Image (cartoon, helix red, strand yellow):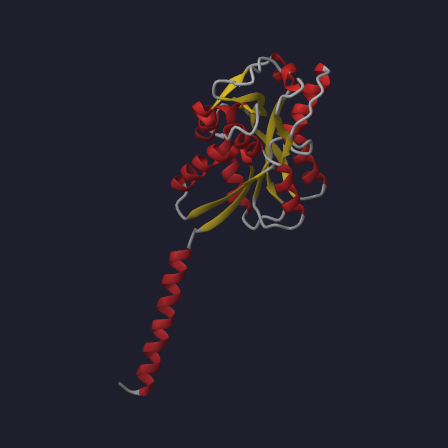
Amino acid sequence: MTGKQKLTALLLAVLLAGTLAGCTGSGSSTLTVFAAASLKGSFTEIAERFEGENPGTTVTLSFAGSADLAAQVSQGAPADVFASADAGTMEKVQEAGLVDGEPRVLATNTLAIAVPAGNPAGISSFADLGRTGTRLVACARQVPCGAAAARVAGSTGTVLSPVSEENSVTDVLGKVTSGEADAGLVYVTDVRSAGSRVESVPFPEAAAAVNPYPAAVLAGSGNKAAAAKFLEFVAGPEGQEVLASAGFGPGTT
């Protein structure tokens, strides 16, 4: 083979490799979703279904307290979608100009009292959470579940003195399941996900602590079309089915 033939063969090989690489990457995308910790189980399943119906799209999920996630977004963390556990946190992100378009409420969640199996402290009402000696664990006030707890406490005149305040509802649940707390203020969905490890104490005041779960495409997203498609999927029949099975109420979309 002459030098000219070798050069031609090399060029053809490079062109072929480039063509194949282009075909392999065609239509592929990665979507980064920041979501409230209480959405972990549901969004994990929803993401798997979404990927199955959208070959080539990979959904990367990051779960934490809504306030922590909002802070990350404000500091420039790369993400395409933000799903908050309350409207207030989303409003702060929106006011900072970090949201593209209007957020949509995908679900609702209600505050619940979780106690260890057998309810050893005998908690029977919301008022019992303010009882002297009760080891209560709650979310910090800047966290949606903490803000919801504060609303109920204010409306009932109950003084809550948590032995620990956590940055996410999953951390509160962990304290209850480990026996470090007599009771924890979490969401209905958290009690359901914990199964037999905890029991739920119903209280009528919970009606004053229903949190909407707004979600939005972020202004800094590099894949807004896929992000919007993901939110449509969550708001659609399959997404709502998964959320309802976890105990979430319907959204307003």
Give me the residue at 70% from left, 17% from top.
Answer: 158
Q: Answer with left or right where residue 251 lies relative to residue 28.
A: right
* Residue 123 screen position, x and y as percent: 57, 16
Whole-percent x, y for residue 76 in the image: 64, 51
The quadrant in which the N terminus is found is: bottom left
Q: Residue at x 65, y 25 (%)?
A: 148
Image quadrant where one finds the C terminus: top right
Q: What x and y, as percent, mark residue 86?
A: 63, 30
Q: Is residue 233 visible?
A: no
- Left or right side of 147 for 107: left
**Is 83 rendered above or below residue 196?**
below
Question: Where is 65 relative to 186, above or below?
Answer: below
Picture layout, residue 94 above or below residue 87: below
Of the pair 76 and 117, the residue shown nearer to us = 117
Q: Quadrant of residue 146?
A: top right
Q: Outermost residue, front direction?
A: 133
- Can you give x and y, in whole percent of width and height, for residue 10 in the image? 35, 77
Residue located farthest toward the left when viewing the structure as drawn: 1
Residue at (50% x, 35% y) in the render: 40
For the image shown, how many numbered marks are present on the structure?
0
